[in-house]
Image (spheres, rainbow, N blue to C red):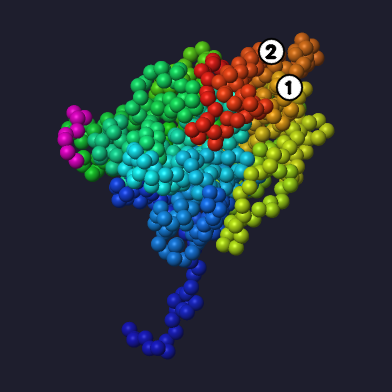
Amino acid sequence: MGVATPGDQLPARLGPRNDPPVRLPARRPLPVYAFDPMSTRLSGRFLTVDVPFERDLEPGPSGRLVQVVDYDAARDVWYRPVDLNDPAILAQGGLRPSESDPRTHQQVVYAVAMSVIERFERFGGQRFRWRGGRELRIVPHAFEGRNAFFDPTRRAVLFGYYKADERDPGSNLPGQVMFTCLSVDVVAHEVTHAIVHRIRKYFSEASNPDVFAWHEAFADLVALFHHFLFPDVVAEAVANSSTDLREGSALLDLALEFGESTGRGAALRSAIGSPRTPDAFLAATEPHARGACFVAAVFDAYLDTYLKQINDLRRLATGGTGVLPPGALPTDLVKRVTVEAIRNADRILGMVVRAFQYLPVVDVTFGDVVRGIVTADRALYPDDAMRLRTNLVEALRRRGIYPPSVSSLTEEALTWPGPADPALSLTRGAHSVDLAPLILEATQNLDLGGEASTTITGADADPEIEGPDKSDARPRVSTRARPAVPAVPAVPAVPAAQSGALKPASATTANSATVVALIEWGRYHAYELGLDPDLPLELVGVHAVFVQASDLQPRPIVVAQFAQRHQELEDQSLPAGKRMAIRAGTTVIARVDGQVVHVVAKPLPLSNPDALTKPETFTGKPDAVRAFAESSAAIGAKRAKALQTWSDHVTSADALAAWTDQPSLLRMTFASLHAAEEVPMPKVVPHA
């Protein structure tokens, strides 16, 4: 073997051109508090939130889904936007959070928001995007006040800051400035409100006591289960409680710093500690309190299932007794129990998230939620091997939460019914729909490494947040341009598609054809859907999702949402723009071959009830369709009466009702809901 000299040639693969490209990372780790500045100060721990790496992320941060706009209106100050792609920031894996550095505040809200959105994509089975394909604005220092809320009119989540209580600030200084944007729980909660509004925009209309209560319950569930993203936090809770998470575990507390700093002396809310009786739910009138009952029931089911799942581990660790001795737990036991705790948390959160596909378009109740959870989960986990579904239904029943119109609490009774016509299909028969573009779009979006489709399904604009002019004069936030966040003025609603005027504005050709065909299909099958064939029909949205079943195989479904506004049932003494909208709606769930499997209807009285008595109305349709239409009309009449009763109750309890012509229900917003001066809630009236 010879010795190489400087003149020898290197092999080609080791030559001077050995410079393969360095790939960008798939993930971006960003530090946040655990779970707020107070808790981090006491524990010495920061958390790392792992989010997708957005290559084209601009300063703000401003990316595909989230745009942080840091304008302090109380002080008329723009804070310099953080550039998470700055080499110095990338090198240290993000900035360490600091109460005195607004750039880290921007980093925290971006990280938590992207993490929450990604959880929805994971459990929901579809690529997420905001209506109109535009970003959600997040304003970390929007105002001075003890509040944070989602504002649909600005398409923004607004966070306040305030001074801690002077007499009882908890573990904070009296008068210390507190930032709601630094609480991981508060950020997760408020971003979830925005996501719910995207998925079911008419859930922002308080048509019954449960609508806003469900909004609050679901936002709390997402924020609490977000804790389980951090194995070290869960492991510490497992070790400190000797595996029994019911025993004084801060893991199940929500917004601890906010609760203590505002003089409550404890967390804002807790998932445990209340008695398993229906008393609290039956007495609750305020949405947070009513929603807390649902959250408590979900965690009852979670803890019951979790404790059963770890019984074998406890027996193995104790020689069969299951009784753990005093002292520190073995490290291996803590690790195994932590895995079970996280697995069960993911499973039950997934149940609740997937239920959204099976919820009505309007006027949701907790009974609807129970049925949606059972229907969705039964399709994916028919054997319920972990008995999570059984435990959840029983936990909800014990707290007084169940559908009032079912014959029993068996899964067969709770599952949403199929269509009156078993042959009802989106792709066969009269006015069939070509679902191929929709399925192709959803399939392409399964590739998370690729660009999300920009096709907009349903109406291209959300009347509440989008104007008819789709050109956006407000530039993205960067170091060069810092746009204001003005209140978006009221704009006319996108006209509901009608015969002869079916084409929605600004849709792609393929999508336009799908939308037009779906509206025609819905109009033709109005009676099968519990809708009115004589009223304009709105396609609120349509999409395909791929959810994973217990056999690890995907189960694709197509979900279409239809709605109708019944202006003849509204208060005719008010101008059209100041009325509380009264809507009917139907969710259609179908297989990808078009076969309809479930119809979730919220009907109202028909504008032409005499049509039900005419033989030609149901020509060529099964007798069951006539029976369903007659039943829907009767249910619709009861629902219309319940809507009026609820409106009257809210108005009678509203001290400002005599001083404004705006209906009390229209003034029930997320801002008023989270503020101290919220609209009073009357005693709950029965609602199917």
Q: Amino acid at mark 1?
A: Ser
> Toward which corner of the image does residue 185 lie, by quadrant?
top left
Mark 2 highlights which residue? 630
For the residues labelled 2 and 1, say whether their Cβ atoms are less than 8 Å apart.
no
For the residue pair 555 and 85, the one nearer the viewer reads as: 85
Q: Position of residue 550 (x, y in %)?
A: 45, 34
For the residue pair 256 and 522, the one nearer the viewer reads as: 256
Magenta region: which residues? 321-328
Q: Amino acid at mark 2?
A: Glu
Residue neighbourhood size for the residue with mark 2, other residues' Cα within 10 Å, grouped as few (<14), some (14–19), many (≥20): some
Taking the spot 44% from the left edge, 76% from the top edge, the residue there is 14
**Residue 189 lies in magenta, yes or no?**
no
Quadrant holding the C terminus: top right
**Residue 325 lies in magenta, yes or no?**
yes
Q: In the rendered structure, which disc, 2 or 1, sits on the residue that comes first in sequence?
A: 1
Characterize the magenta stretch by its predominant secondary structure. loop
Q: Position of residue 598 (x, y in %)?
A: 60, 25
Residue neighbourhood size for the residue with mark 1, other residues' Cα within 10 Å, grouped as few (<14), some (14–19), many (≥20): few
Element type at mark 1: loop
Kindly tell me whether residue 556 is visible in this rendering: no
For the residue pair 59 and 419, the one nearer the viewer reads as: 59
Mark 1 highlights which residue? 573
Element type at mark 2: helix
Taking the spot 54% from the left edge, 36% from the top edge, the residue there is 671
Q: Position of residue 108 (x, y in %)?
A: 45, 51
Taking the spot 44% from the left edge, 65% from the top edge, the residue there is 88
Kindly tell me whether residue 130 is visible in this rendering: yes
Q: Position of residue 393 (x, y in %)?
A: 44, 22
Taking the spot 41% from the left edge, 48% from the top edge, the residue there is 177
Viewed as shown, does residue 226 lie left or right of 155? left
